[in-house]
Image (spheres, helix red, strand yellow):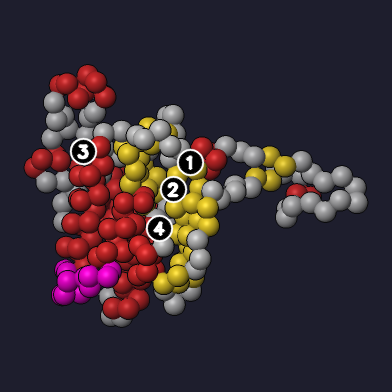
Amino acid sequence: MNVMDDKQERQVVSRRRVADHGEVYTAKREVCAMLDLVKEETERIDSRFLEPACDNGNFLVEILRRKMEAVRRQFARNRYEYDQASAVAVSSMYGVELLPDNVEECRQRLLTQYLETYREHQHVDAAPELERCIRFLLRKNILCGDALTMLQQNGEPITFCEWTFIGIGGKVKRRDFELAELLRNVEYDKPKPGEEGLLFADTGEPTFVHLPKREFPIVDYLKLPDYE
């Protein structure tokens, strides 16, 4: 599949958008060349990526293509494992975009990429409950906001979900973190003599702990949309 169709291959939508927002899409050749610098990570199913100015998704679409190919190589013969691994791949990609129309287009492109790839690999359409899960993951992971101010369009802090898949049973633990918290190093001093410190605090290195904004119960990954 192509990273971009004819519309996405254009690097500029309008002069006005360039002037107002500095919007210039990265061309397919540059996308692939840059991702090749971290090729092993793009082909690791659970490796997390954050695109802080994702536009309509050129980088994320190519990352998903590579991850789904890794899913095919490892799990194509077992549809149950393929379904779960493909959800892991989608859950590992995050994006922030300033313009609402780009956000919607990015989500739709990723969904289309997923569904078409699924059909190509499995020779059937993804089950409705799986497609529902993928749509939910994309809605939670691709957000409209400003990565510089770390605020969403509605003024709320940009908050991402951490999806931790547990074993091969399809169970997932969700924890929500504010982006500002993830990017801020919260340093804890070494404990005083006689006090109990944090793990690895005695190595002499700073220890950083990020506290979740919210935690959810462990559930089947296909049930994630039910625990909003």
Within 10 Å of disc 2 (Cα), the crowding (few <14, some 14-19, many 20+) is many
Q: Nearer the viewer, mark 3 or mark 4?
A: 4
Question: Whole-Å distance between the Cαs marked 3 and 4?
Answer: 24 Å
Question: Whole-Å distance between the Cαs marked 3 and 1?
Answer: 22 Å
**Highlighted magenta segment, given as a residue range:** 119-130
Judging by the rendered image, the residue that carries numbered circle 1 is: 179
Q: Is residue 121 magenta?
A: yes
- Vertical position of residue 11 compared to residue 204: above or below: above
Of residues 84 and 129, the one nearer the viewer is: 129
Judging by the rendered image, the residue that carries numbered circle 4 is: 228
Judging by the rendered image, the residue that carries numbered circle 2 is: 160
Determine the image quadrant of residue 155.
top left
Within 10 Å of disc 3 (Cα), the crowding (few <14, some 14-19, many 20+) is few
Judging by the rendered image, the residue that carries numbered circle 3 is: 101
Q: Nearer the viewer, mark 1 or mark 4?
A: 4
In percent of the image, x 40 and y 58: which residue is there? 228
- Vertical position of residue 180 compared to residue 203: above or below: above
SS for tag 2? Answer: strand
**Mark closer to the chain start, 1 or 4:** 1
Question: Whole-Å distance between the Cαs marked 1 and 4?
Answer: 19 Å
SS for tag 4? Answer: loop
Of residues 8 and 91, the one nearer the viewer is: 91
The kind of residue tagged 2 is Phe
**Mark closer to the chain start, 3 or 2:** 3
Q: Give yes or no for contact between labels 2 and 1 (Cβ–Cβ under 8 Å).
A: yes
Is residue 27 visible in this depiction of the protein? yes
Is residue 121 visible in this depiction of the protein? no
